[in-house]
Image: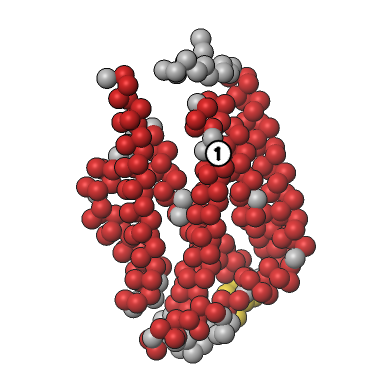
Amino acid sequence: MNETTSTGEQLPEYSIIDHLNDLRKMIMRSFLAVLLAGAVVFSAKEIVFDKILFAPLELDFVTYRFFCQITDLLCIEKIPITLISRQLQGQFVVHLWTAVYGGVILAFPYIVYEIWKFISPGLYRNEKKTGVKFITITSVLFFIGIWFGYYVITPLVVNFLGNYQISDQVENYVDIKSYISNVRTTVLANGITFELPVMIYFFTRMGLVDSGFLKRNRKYAVLVILILAAIITPPDVVSQIIVAIPLLILYEISIFVAKAIERKQSKELKPHS
C-alpha cells in the first residue's frame, strides 16, 4: 500500500528489487564518474604532485608565509624531509591511488547528486524541491573541509613531524607512500568532518539526536575538539586555536540546524493536534 500525506499526496511504491536496481545504477554511474575524474588526475602528474602534494614541503608555501606574518612563533626555518621510494612499484602505486582519491574528490558533487536521485523517490514533493540546495551545501562544506585540511592541517602536521627529532643522529628519510598517505588522509578526513551539519540534519530528521542533546554535550564536544587540535598541531596555543575554531563553529552550526528541523517538524504536526 502506498504511503499518503495529510494533503492527499501519494508516494510511489517501490519493491526491494527496484531499490536494488536503482542502487546498482547509482554505484555504477558514481564509479564511472570517479574513474573519469581519476583519469584526469592521473594524467596531470606534474601538477598534482609537484604543485599540490609536495608544495607543503617548501618553505615558501603560502600557509607558512601567512603563519609567519601572524607571529614569529610560527615561522619555519626548515623542513628536513627527504622523500624516498623503497619499492620498485612504489611510485606507480602512489600515483595510482592518488588518482583514485583525487577522482573521488573531483567527482564528489556528482556522487552527492546520484545519492540524492536515489533517495528522492521516497521524499514528499516539497522535500524534493530542496535537491539543489542539498547538493550545493553538501559539496561546498566538503570542499571547504578539503581546503582547510590542505592549507591548514597538512602544513602544521608536516612542519611538526618533519622537525620532530628524538636525536640528531636520526634523519628523516620518509617513504613517499607514508607522506602521500598522510596528506590524502588528512585532506579527505577534513572534507568528511566538515559534513557535520549535514549529518546532524539527517540524524535530527530520524530522531537520533536533538538540539537539547547537542547543547547538553557541548562541553564534551569542546573538550574533544581541543584534544584533537592538540594532537594534530604543533605544541603551541596559536596553531591549536586556528584548528579548533572552525570545528567549534561547525558544532554550533549543527545545533542551529537541529533547532531549525525541530521547528519545522513542530509546525508540520500542528494541523494534526
Q: Tally the numbered discs.
A: 1
* Residue depicted at x 49% and y 59%: 145
**Quadrant hosting residue 271:** top left
| Left or right, residue 197 beside residue 23 | left
Amino acid tagged 1: Gly
Q: Residue furthest right?
A: 43
Q: Looking at the image, which is closer to me, 153 or 89?
A: 153
By what rule are the colours in the image chosen? Answer: secondary structure
Q: Using the image, determine if residue 97 lies above or below residue 74.
A: above
* Residue depicted at x 31% and y 76%: 237
Badge 1 local density, few (<14 within 10 Å), some, or many (20+)?
some
Residue 149 % position (x, y): 50, 65
Which quadrant of the figure contains the C terminus?
Answer: top left
> Mark 1 sits on what residue?
131
Residue 38 % position (x, y): 71, 55
Residue 9 % position (x, y): 50, 18
**Quadrant hosting residue 203:** top left
Q: Using the image, determine if residue 49 lies above or below residue 57.
A: above
* Residue depicted at x 61% and y 50%: 108
Q: Looking at the image, which is closer to me, 25 or 210?
A: 210
Q: Secondary structure at mark 1?
A: helix
* Residue depicted at x 68% and y 32%: 25
| Left or right, residue 49 beside residue 245 | right
Q: Looking at the image, which is closer to me, 104 or 184?
A: 104
Asked if residue 97 can be seen in this view, the reply is no
Residue 118 % position (x, y): 59, 32
Asked if residue 6 can be seen in this view, the reply is yes
| Left or right, residue 69 beside residue 47 | left
